[in-house]
Image (cartoon, rainbow, N blue to C red):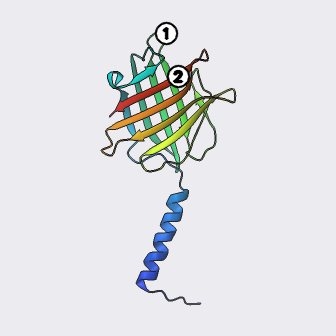
Amino acid sequence: MHIRMSKQTLFLFVGIVVALVSGTSAQAPKGLEGTWKLNVEKSKFSPGPPPKSMTVTYSAAGADGTKVVVDITPATGAAQHWEMTVTYDGKESPIKGNPNADTVSAKPSKGLTSESTFKKGGKVTATNHRALSADGKTLTVTSKGVTEDGKPRNDVQVLEK
């Protein structure tokens, strides 16, 4: 069977296929890969105190995943090292090293934003909304949840490349 299509019909068909494939591909916002450092002065932590330092490194992991490595020096206590691989499909993935969460799930990104949910023992401990600036130089993470001792937590973390 031979199907004949005009160039306009072919371009429309290819455009629809590309839109469907990219619409189902679960991935982090473009430009997220690399190492980000917390700008403590521009960030807000409630309750505080803020960490002394924090770096977050994003790298590709497989076709649809993102490996996330977090290194934090808290205001008090020992340094922390967290690792997780997020698949942006809404499914839970394990976290290693985070004292306040043992799983994370993420929704597919919408342009320069994405959302993730952290749980410990099946209970939500934080919901993060992440927004990447248009120039790709600033990452803002708005986090709402509870502290290790159960107090409400509302943070705005500003990270820079």
Q: Amino acid at mark 2?
A: Arg
Camera-nearest residue between 155 and 92? 155
Left or right, residue 149 beside residue 5: right
Q: Quadrant of residue 48?
A: top left
As drawn, 55 above or below 135 = above
Q: What residue is shown with label 2?
A: 153
Q: Residues within 10 Å of mark 2 (few under 14, many from 20)?
A: some
**What percent of the width, then of the height, locates residue 51?**
42, 17
Which residue is at a point 50% across and 48% down the rendered structure image?
27
Which residue is at a point 48% across and 86% down the rendered structure image?
5
> Which residue is most to the top?
76
As drawn, 107 above or below 147 = below
- Figure quadrant of the C terminus: top left
Q: Residues within 10 Å of mark 1 (few under 14, many from 20)?
A: few
As drawn, 103 above or below 59 = above
**What percent of the width, then of the height, locates residue 105?**
59, 39
Q: Nearer the viewer, mark 1 or mark 2?
A: 2
> Which residue is most to the right?
122
* Disc 1 from disc 2: Cα separation: 19 Å
- Figure quadrant of the N terminus: bottom right
**What percent of the width, then of the height, locates residue 145?**
56, 26
Secondary structure found at label 2: strand
Asked whether the beta carbons under mark 1 and mark 2 sit within 8 Å of each other, the answer is no
Secondary structure found at label 1: loop
Residue 77 badge: 1
Q: Earlier in the sequence, mark 1 or mark 2?
A: 1
Which residue is at a point 47% across and 50% down the rendered structure image?
110
Q: Amino acid at mark 1?
A: Gly
Which residue is at a point 52% across and 40% down the rendered structure image?
115
